Amino acid sequence: MLYVNICVCVIIFAIWSYIFIKTYQLNGYYVKVFLNNVFNFHLAFGDKNKLVFTKRMIRFILIYLILTIAIFFLINYFVKNIYLKILDCAVVFLLAPFVIVLTHYLLLPFENLIKKGYVKKARKKLAKLKIIKIGITGSYGKTSTKNILATMLEKEYKVCTTPKSYNTEMGVTKTILDDLDDHDVFIAEMGARHKGDIEALTRLVKPSYGILTTIGSQHIETFRTLKNIEETKNELPKNLAKDGTMVFNGDSPSTYKLYKNFTGNKYLANYKNAFARAENVEMDENGSTFDLLLDGKATKVTTRLLGKCNIDNIVTASALAYVLGISREDIASAIKSLTPSPHRLEVLKNNYSTILDDSYNSNAIGAKEALEVLSRFKGVKIVVTPGLVEMGAQQSQANFKLGTQIADVADYIIIMNEINKNDLLSGAISHNFDRNKIFFASTRKKQKEILELLTIKGCVILFENDLPDNYQ
């Protein structure tokens, strides 16, 4: 009977724990972020994100189950009163997040040892290769700039890049070990949620070239202040290889400030009289045409990419490509061939409607740009968004402002999730948007039902941001 009780408790507890463990994984195994989401009840309900059974997660689950069995064994063995036994088990259920935290810290030394081994192996592999190493960081535009630069450099070099948004130390390490082979160039996207993250990546990659894109309030919830974000992004230029070269996107005030402070080899893009800039810009729903100025000489270029942010990314990437020996003609050819990064202001058309998929964008600057692009399209305009997150004390104000911006462009608004609902609604109404044209959807199924009612031939639907399951 004892073992039956233990088995029943463990099975029920494991089912109960699934949501917490998935939330823990979605939070990047960061305990502070995980506990903050637990206390705010931002748990990973829903099926947008699945629990990924990586080797690390399998190790975690095994230790978690061992702890769970031990806890319920002690309760069922030593507690004789049935009511007290039930009460103790109920308390354990309530303390599930803390069992996850305990498991995390029990495994941490072992996980760090494994991580150090992989990183050391990757560092040794890189040291043996005579290749051009490039680091790209910033708050926004990293992935797009990386993909644009790779397309340009492929005119002369064999290029390896970190895939998708692989921008953590282990993501970059995995790319080096699994994908880097007989390449001439390695481009590493470098992300950060805490101070020191970029420095750790530069110690791994040791880049000789770097790009600093737009700096803004992304992840302000973990960084706390814009100054902390600036200092973290500055870890790339500060730790660049000796005699290395940096390109800065001067359209961003914070990036421009770091450009001014940097004493090494540097180039400025997207600023008055900068080394690289765009002039005579013409944009419509099919893309952009502009004069690309590199070192004072202009080349007319055309791209299918939409929005000013993408033009800034193109110009920034062009500066480094040119420095690395790619001709103006090849740069122009590469720009013409560019396709949008998936889910980053990607245009998807069918015979009935046009979709602007900006679901991987989660920042105020990009959202504003996406709405500006939407305004250039004809037809009924529908915006689907959950708003902006990870903005700390600024989040309410930012989403109120986003609501006002949407109201100035859209004909209908579908607000996903609960977290920013009131701020988006208030912002839209403050700009005299018809309340009857604002809808709420807590699930994808409900979103689909509303869209089926609103969609007419020739309409344009903007999907702006897509939150993971831990946001309701």
Image (cartoon, grey):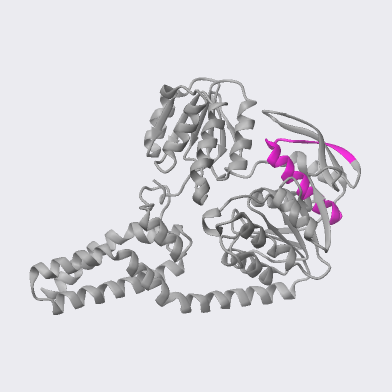
Residue 101 screen position, x and y as percent: 38, 69
Which one is nearer the viewer's eye here, 82 or 39? Answer: 39
Q: Looking at the image, can residue 387 be seen? A: yes
Left or right of residue 406, residue 77 in this image: left
* Residue at screen point 31% across, 61% down: 17
At which x and y percent is residue 362?
55, 45
Q: Residue furthest right?
A: 297
Q: Is residue 394 above or below residue 176?
A: above
Q: Quadrant of residue 182?
A: bottom right
Which residue corresponds to the image point at 49% horizontal and 34% vertical from the top-left?
384
**Foreground: 120 or 397?**
397
Q: Residue at x 20, y 64 (%)?
A: 90
Please provide the residue range marked out in magenta: 298-325
From this view, report whether residue 459 is shown above or below residue 387: above
> Which of the 4 image quadrants contains residue 174?
bottom right
The question of residue 410 being in magenta is answered with no
Q: Position of residue 260 (x, y in %)?
A: 80, 56
Classify the position of the C terminus by image quarter: top left
